[in-house]
Amino acid sequence: SQQGEEDPQALSIQEGENATMNCSYKTSINNLQWYRQNSGRGLVHLILIRSNEREKHSGRLRVTLDTSKKSSSLLITASRAADTASYFCATDGAAGNKLTFGGGTRVLVKP
Amino acid sequence: DAGITQSPRYKITETGRQVTLMCHQTWSHSYMFWYRQDLGHGLRLIYYSAAADITDKGEVPDGYVVSRSKTENFPLTLESATRSQTSVYFCASRYSGSKETQYFGPGTRLLVL
């Protein structure tokens, strides 16, 4: 079973708009990570937020984490056509040896 | 800097045949992982390895065998391929001292007829 579940499953926006996607998980975590996957490619790490952090920024990315609600959000500001990809959250649980991935959000940024 | 590579990139095989997917990394990462990616399931962990000669099962290990005789290689074998093993397979690796970023290979697309 998946630890993380992303919402929405798919998102279509115009270039320049913001894209927001959410991730919910079930058990306690050490950290939560977001990855991007372009079509036909492997996953690329975007950002990591630790369980004691509430918000983190990296360029046009903003990640929040609410451990009380067991949820996280990823915001991409001023989206570009190159941001078209699938985005996955992954949680690193107490054992810390491995990640559990959600089903992903497919984002389409229209020029 | 080759990073992490997988071979073959595409493979077509028949039910019942043995298939081995290769994964090679040049960073000397201790940890290596095999995932499969199917529509509607995201990525699911098949097996992982913490070091040479140390392997452990993930979420969906049935029908797969792994070995890790050398740190840089982590082959995945389907002993008797089934149609349900048609999928995209990703290998990943990470440093031992960090429980953080995993680095992914480009994937192998496997079709079992």
Image (tube, coloured by chain):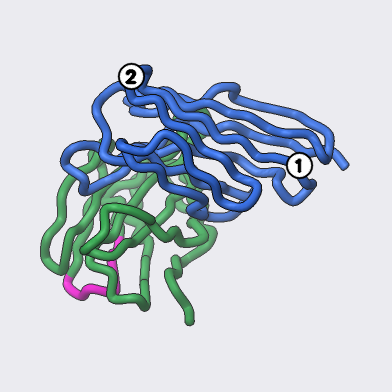
Q: Position of residue B74 (x, y in %)?
A: 28, 65
Left or right of B77 on screen, residue A13: right
> What kind of element bears circle 2?
loop
Would you identify the image quadrant in which residue A84 lies? Answer: top right
User: Which color was chain A given?
Assistant: blue
> What kind of element bears circle 1?
loop
In the rendered image, the vertical position of residue A21 relative to residue B108, given as above or below: above
Label 1 resides on the chain identified as: A
Would you identify the image quadrant in which residue B36 lies? Answer: top left
Tell me the crowding category of disc 1: few under 14, some 14 to 19, or many 20 or more residues within 10 angstroms, Cα based. some
Q: Which residue is mark 2?
A: A68
Left or right of B70 on screen, residue A84: right
Residue A78 lies in the magenta-colored region: no
**Cα–Cα span, label 2 and label 1:** 29 Å
Q: Position of residue A45 (x, y in %)?
A: 48, 53
* Residue at the image point whose x is 55% and y is 22% from the top: A7
Q: Name the residue furthest right.
A: A111
Tell me where the magenta segment starts and ends, as one range: B69-75
In the rendered image, the vertical position of residue A51 relative to residue B93, given as above or below: above
* Residue at the image point whose x is 68% and y is 35% from the top: A107
Label 2 resides on the chain identified as: A
Q: What amino acid does circle 2 point to? A: Ser
In the rendered image, the vertical position of residue B81 relative to residue A66, given as above or below: below
Q: Identify the disc placed on residue B75.
A: none
Q: Can see residue A83? A: yes
Q: Which residue is mark 1?
A: A78
In the rendered image, the vertical position of residue B91 relative to residue B14, given as above or below: below
Q: Position of residue A10 (x, y in %)?
A: 65, 26
Q: Which chain did the renderer colour green?
A: B
Q: Name the chief secondary structure element in magenta.
A: loop
* Residue at the image point whose x is 62% and y is 52% from the top: A59
Front one among A2 and B65:
A2
